[in-house]
Amino acid sequence: MANFYRIVVSLMMLSIYSVTSASDCVILLHGLARTSASMEKLASALTSEGFQVANTAYPSRDHTIEQLSKVAIESGLSACAPGATVHFVTHSLGGILVRYYMENYTENNDLEGLGRVVMLAPPNQGSGVVDVLRDLSVFEFVNGLAGLQLGTDPDSIPSRLGAVEFELGVIAGSRSLNPILSQFLPNPDDGKVSVESTRVEGMADFITVSHSHPFIMQASDVIQQTIHFIRNGKFSHEPR
């Protein structure tokens, strides 16, 4: 029995070592008013592919984008093994946090050890939904201060951010499950952001998928494309 426990402990230590010594770490950042649980399927797939994964939780409704960016990203970075190449996969607001961090909390838009970034349904040019609904008290209650900063006006955070200077792939959704919100967006859209508004100057690649904003990160084809971009720096544009 003593030998059995020694073997179990040895295997546990091996597992810990294999994770903490991983050469590639992927930081996952969920979207507004969501939790890290929304990224679990993606986290599991990345782990199966041999990546170290930091599925980062942050209080998206409690602070501004300026505050959230530093808290969320530095929390993710602290979970990666020293010396690892760091990739980011973000949903919605998470992409804006990365852009803000790169412009304001790094020197010359350069994060040491940065690999590739995949943004899922990011409001890179803001969202028309915010423009229309921001004055309703219930909007701030549901989406917090960060939600109010995601409009398309010149003073919004997305409008104030410049071109990206890192290797970025953007996946946009073109299917809406919310026809009411879609009325406030240029079509096609995913119910929260239009396909066009996900684009940003400097991105390396771009694809559109037939998925909605709330569930795009859980779609199998999106997960496959995400892994493909992290490994190759481009999406697979081959027809299914």
Image (tube, rainbow, N blue to C red):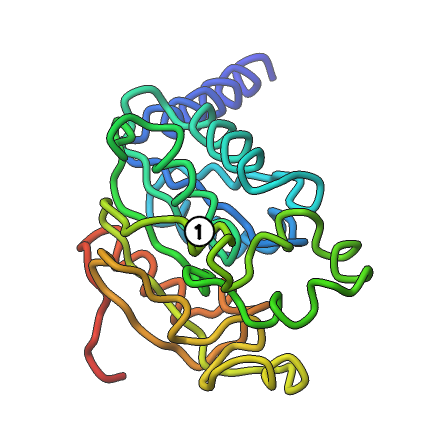
Residue sitting nearer the eye, 207 or 192: 192
Q: Is residue 49 left or right of residue 39?
A: left
Q: Residue 149 location, x and y as percent?
A: 58, 52
Given residues 130 and 78, the one toward you in this image is 130
Pointer 1 local density, CA inside 10 Å: few below 14, some 14–19, many at least 20: many
Q: Which is more toward the observer, 71 or 43? A: 71
Image quarter in which the N terminus is found: top right
Residue 161 point in image, percent of width and height = 38, 48
Count the marks. 1
Residue closest to the eye, 217 or 72: 72
Task: Name the residue: 35% across, 37% down.
Answer: 103
Q: Is residue 204 above or below residue 59?
A: below
Percent of width and height locating residue 102: 35, 37
Point out the image quarter for the C terminus: bottom left
* Corner quadrant of residue 106: top left
Question: Looking at the rendering, which quadrant does residue 141 occupy?
Answer: bottom right
At horizontal 62% and vertical 82% (from top left) the residue drawn is 177
Query: Circle 1 sits in a helix, a strand or a loop, which is it?
Result: helix
- Give the residue at mark 1: 95
What residue is shown at x 23% (from left), y 84% (from top)?
Answer: 239
- Image point (50%, 83%), residue name: 175
Asked which quadrant contains residue 22, the reply is top left
